[in-house]
């Protein structure tokens, strides 16, 4: 959840290439008959030497050291070592188990252990304190700022009504800004800024630091928000321009002028000694409001009305933002996890697809072909990317049933395969990779918006177009590394 097993060894400090590791694994790793047993101390010491190796000859030395480690490792250990070397051995995977073990060993409640880890981000330290000082020692651990918490994540909702239903009524909607997420830590007047990937980007965004120093009240804090690049008329700039800001290390001042940033704060996780992640979002927002000026806060409404929320969504989209976030009022902040407390609602995109087949409905729709297999063209081959039975009126179902039967090629028990002639426009919220379809992609929340009799079959979209849309989605997602 917080940090890595050996936080001091990130891939950059170790600086070991994948080819080195691969060579060792291919030639001799795990094959030694008389392995020396690896100990944590030995791994730690060796990695320290790898990280310390600098200058001429250091590459060779690093390779030898890594080789030494990997040849002493059994297959489980190799797996762990490789993940440590490439920075993927986050505590997240086994954190729950580790925490329980520490709680038991230190005879302390699990909640207290978890909190201590949140504070320090250092599992080793938490274990040490738990064993030597027990619960009392753990409760005394102060937050160590400048150790970023993993960001809480959101699931996709189809629309406002769905989110309201899952949140059992009144809930908060915030503009979803099309930018980069940052976590701002301030301790004793010093401010540091971390990206979504938890790297320190303070030096690339001096004006954000200044803004926080001047405008955000309270003493020591951890707050979260989104920075957006804005153009001359104060509207969001394309994401690429923002990325230029984050990757820039030289001439930052020039970039500050060229690509100004706007900050939208949406959460507070820590304030003056109090970790707030277990507080309900409702209270965190109140605290945020009390320390940050209104113009720095994400635009937000609280409502149980889907119509009001949809209007708010339209407003967000017209202003050039990405959609809305929906946040359950009584939800804690759960670092690194993607649950139903936070939803995102984005503008639906549309594709023109051909109907390649249709399933007979059940229940009320028994006599209709009502579940449509939607396809796009790969050259002249229709490739299915999803199915839907949503969006049509009874009248339209009847029409589709007749039309598709006239295009029938073959029929199995539930499914009528048709000549791919009929074009429908479908709206969807997201494209996912899918092993399920030969196309490799699947639409999420697809629904028919219009039957496009005006369009010829070959005017439907292509698989290449779908691939491009898929890639575009990553502008906003994990793959973007700041
Ligand atoms: P996604 O990356 O599509 O899963 O959407 C979640 C991301 O939206 C977050 O990680 C933030 O970077 C961004 N975001 C923009 N506005 C907000 C907001 N008001 N609250 C939370 N996240 C936001």
Image: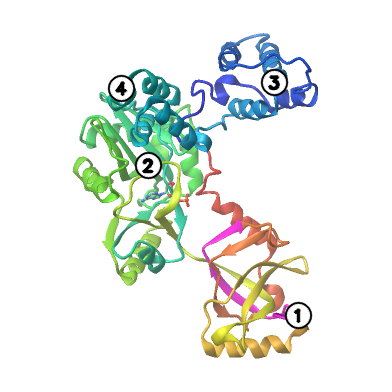
Which residue is more in the foreground, 305 or 351? 305
Pick whichever of labels 3 and 1 is earlier in the sequence: 3
The residue carrying mark 3 is: 70
Looking at the rendered structure, the secondary structure element under dot 4 is: helix
Pick whichever of labels 4 and 2 is earlier in the sequence: 4
The answer to whether the residue labelled 3 contacts the one labelled 1, judged by CB atoms less than 8 Å apart, is: no
- In the figure, is residue 408 to the left or right of 266? right
Looking at the rendered structure, the secondary structure element under dot 3 is: helix
Q: Main secondary structure of the magenta part?
A: strand
- Density class for disc 3 (Cα within 10 Å; few <14, some 14-19, many ≥20) is many
Residue drawn at 45 percent across, 28 percent down: 251
Residue bounds of the magenta highlight: 412-432
Residue 64 spot, x, y in % from top left: 70, 13
- In the figure, is residue 132 to the left or right of 439? left
In what quadrant of the picture does the N terminus appear? Answer: top left
Q: CA distance from mark 3 to mark 1?
A: 55 Å
Which residue is more in the foreground, 243 or 439? 439
- In the figure, is residue 199 to the left or right of 281? right
Task: Name the residue at the left extreme.
Answer: 290
Q: CA distance from mark 3 to mark 4?
A: 37 Å
Q: CA distance from mark 1 to mark 4?
A: 68 Å
Q: Is residue 425 magenta?
A: yes
Q: Nearer the viewer, mark 3 or mark 2?
A: 3
The residue carrying mark 1 is: 412
- Density class for disc 2 (Cα within 10 Å; few <14, some 14-19, many ≥20) is many
Residue 204 spot, x, y in % from top left: 42, 31
Pick whichever of labels 1 and 4 is earlier in the sequence: 4
Q: Quadrant of residue 80?
A: top right
The residue carrying mark 2 is: 261
Q: Nearer the viewer, mark 4 or mark 2?
A: 4
Q: Nearer the viewer, mark 1 or mark 4?
A: 4
Residue 198 spot, x, y in % from top left: 45, 34
């Amino acid at each position: 959840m917080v940090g890595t097993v050996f936080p001091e060894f990130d891939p950059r400090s170790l600086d070991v290439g994948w080819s080195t590791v691969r060579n060792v694994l291919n030639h001799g790793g795990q094959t030694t008959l008389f392995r020396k047993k690896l100990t944590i101390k030995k791994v730690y010491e060796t990695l320290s030497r790898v990280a310390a190796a600098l200058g001429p000859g250091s590459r060779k030395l690093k390779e030898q050291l890594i080789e030494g480690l990997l040849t002493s490792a059994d297959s489980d250990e190799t797996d762990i070592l490789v993940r440590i070397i490439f920075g993927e051995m986050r505590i997240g995977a086994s954190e729950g188990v580790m925490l329980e073990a520490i709680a038991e060993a230190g005879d302390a409640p699990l909640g207290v252990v978890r909190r201590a880890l949140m504070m320090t981000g250092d599992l080793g330290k938490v274990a040490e304190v738990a064993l030597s000082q027990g619960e009392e020692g753990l409760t005394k651990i102060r937050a160590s700022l400048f150790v970023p918490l993993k960001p809480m994540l959101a699931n996709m909702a189809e629309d406002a009504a769905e989110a309201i239903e899952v949140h059992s009524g009144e809930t908060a909607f915030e503009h979803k800004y099309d930018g980069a997420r940052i976590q701002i830590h301030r301790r004793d007047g010093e401010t540091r800024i971390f990206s979504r990937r938890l790297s320190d980007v303070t030096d690339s965004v001096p004006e954000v630091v200044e803004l926080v120093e001047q405008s955000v009240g309270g003493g020591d804090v951890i707050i979260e928000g989104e920075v957006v690049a804005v153009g001359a008329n104060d509207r969001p700039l394309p994401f690429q321009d923002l990325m230029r800001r984050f990757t820039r290390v030289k001439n930052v001042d020039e970039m500050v002028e060229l690509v100004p940033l706007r900050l939208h704060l949406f959460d507070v996780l820590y304030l003056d000694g109090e970790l707030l992640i277990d507080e309900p979002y409702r209270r965190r927002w109140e605290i945020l409001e009390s320390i940050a000026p209104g113009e720095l806060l994400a635009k937000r409404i609280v409502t149980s009305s889907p119509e009001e929320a949809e209007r708010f969504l339209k407003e967000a989209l017209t202003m050039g933002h990405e959609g809305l976030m929906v946040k359950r009022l009584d939800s804690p902040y759960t670092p690194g996890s993607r649950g139903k407390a936070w939803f995102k609602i984005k503008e639906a995109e549309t594709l023109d697809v051909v109907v390649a087949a249709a399933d007979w409905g059940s229940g009320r729709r028994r006599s209709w072909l009502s579940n449509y297999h939607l396809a796009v063209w790969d050259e002249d081959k229709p490739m299915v990317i999803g199915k839907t039975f949503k969006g049509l009126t009874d009248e339209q179902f009847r029409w589709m049933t007749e039309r598709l039967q006239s295009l029938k090629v073959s029929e199995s028990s539930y499914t009528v395969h048709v000549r791919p002639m009929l074009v429908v426009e479908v709206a969807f919220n997201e494209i996912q990779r899918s092993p399920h379809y030969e196309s490799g992609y699947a639409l999420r929340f697809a629904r028919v918006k219009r039957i496009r009799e005006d369009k010829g079959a070959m005017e439907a979209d292509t698989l290449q177009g779908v691939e491009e849309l898929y890639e575009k989605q990553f502008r906003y997602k994990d793959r973007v590394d700041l």
